Amino acid sequence: MKALIAIGMVMMAFCAFPLSVFAQDNMPPAPYAYRQLDDPQQERKARELMETLRCLTCQSQSIADSDAPMAGDMRHQVRTRIAAGQEPAQIRQWLMDRYGDYISYTPRVNSVTWPLFAIPAIVLLLAGLAVWRRIGRRQNYKGDE
Amino acid sequence: MRNLRIGLWALVAVVIGLFALFAIQLSRPKDDSVESRMIGKPVPEFALKPIVAGRPGLTSADLKDGQPKLLNIFASWCVPCAAEAPQLAELEAHGADIVGVAIRDRPEDVARFLDFYGDPYSRIGGDDLSEVQIDIGSSGVPETFIVDGKGTIRYQHIGDIREDDVPLLLQKLNEAAK
């Protein structure tokens, strides 16, 4: 019994402190990782794009939200490319050519994702049909009176 | 009444279907690795400065010299990179030409890392802003790409190279040589 408790505690300790494989480097962040662009309009464009790009080393965050060094380097890429006159769609495509749909938080319709777009439409259609039939029936009922 | 019964059974079927979907998806092993879409494409243009004294840097032209190469993306601060060092040494012993891209690293740290864990690299470029890493579609360290003599990316290995990955990498390198 004691042995079991000991094993349990060791396992809990491992869960609480997962092996840290994502060590951090000692380099300063990229120039435009935390620095905004001077032109507020360009910065807004960059910001909107960064919020819809997924961080690769911390996959549940956008690169705008993450302090991971690689997310900083990606923000640097986004800002310098925006500053150089590229369009956000162009930059998104550049990244998707490298990392696939994974990098983008804006879903596209493809062979895997189409149910996401089709199911709500079908449900809406069915609901509309049900409501229409019910209203129709009630009007018939009134007509009979 | 009959319609109601059919409706209820349909509902039960939908719920069972949903649970079946959960069961299938949950029993799949989790795979977080993001594969590069650059495989089969030419390496992007780049020129990385040397990072350790006496060792040339790395440019995309070096990857088009007719010899297939292992392009190893590593960093001195990365723990699994140290773990794969013996396997890189083994690959080098089998004749692999290994070139390195050091991500966000300082010269003194790279030098210390190579002293400690061995140095299989013919060239090492310093990538201070992860530019080459992003341009090649690598999402972390370590990763190893196989690039053929014309500079086309042929294969990507994500994560550290384990002992049992070595034969496959050698085979892919041989295929790239053809």
Image (cartoon, rainbow, N blue to C red):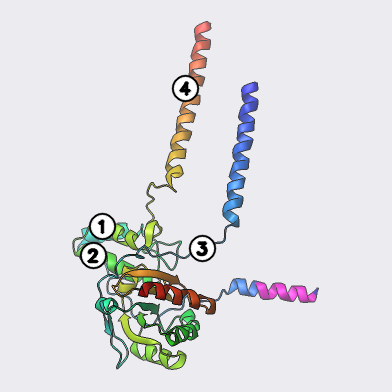
Q: Residue furthest front?
A: B178
Is A3 one of the magenta-colored residues?
Answer: yes
* Residues at discs 4 and 2 both on one chain: yes
Q: Is residue B93 above or below residue A86?
A: below
The span from disc 4 to disc 1 (Cα, nearest Å) is 45 Å
B136 left or right of B89 in image = left
Q: What amino acid type is highlighted by mark number 3?
A: Asp
Identify the residue at image location x=46%, y=61%.
Answer: A60
Circles 2 and 1, Cβ within 8 Å, touching? The answer is yes
Q: Residues within 10 Å of mark 2 (few under 14, many from 20)?
A: some
Residue B53, horizontal then vertical, whole percent: 30, 93
Q: Please tell me which of labels 4 and 1 falls first in the chain.
A: 1
Quadrant, the N terminus of chain B = top right
Residue A41, horizontal then vertical, whole percent: 21, 58
Q: Which residue is mark 4?
A: A132
Q: Residues within 10 Å of mark 3 (few under 14, many from 20)?
A: few
The span from disc 3 to disc 4 (Cα, nearest Å) is 46 Å
Foreground: disc 4 or disc 1:
1
Foreground: disc 3 or disc 1:
3
The span from disc 3 to disc 2 (Cα, nearest Å) is 31 Å
Circles 3 and 2, Cβ within 8 Å, touching? The answer is no
Q: Which residue is mark 3?
A: B31
Q: Residue furthest top?
A: A145
| Secondary structure state at the residue bearing disc 1 | helix
Q: What amino acid type is highlighted by mark number 4?
A: Trp
Identify the residue at image location x=63%, y=25%.
Answer: B4
Badge number at residue A81: 2
- Using the image, name the chain to which the residue with label 3 belongs: B
| Secondary structure state at the residue bearing disc 2 | helix
Q: Which residue is mark 1?
A: A90
Identify the residue at image location x=61%, y=34%.
Answer: B11
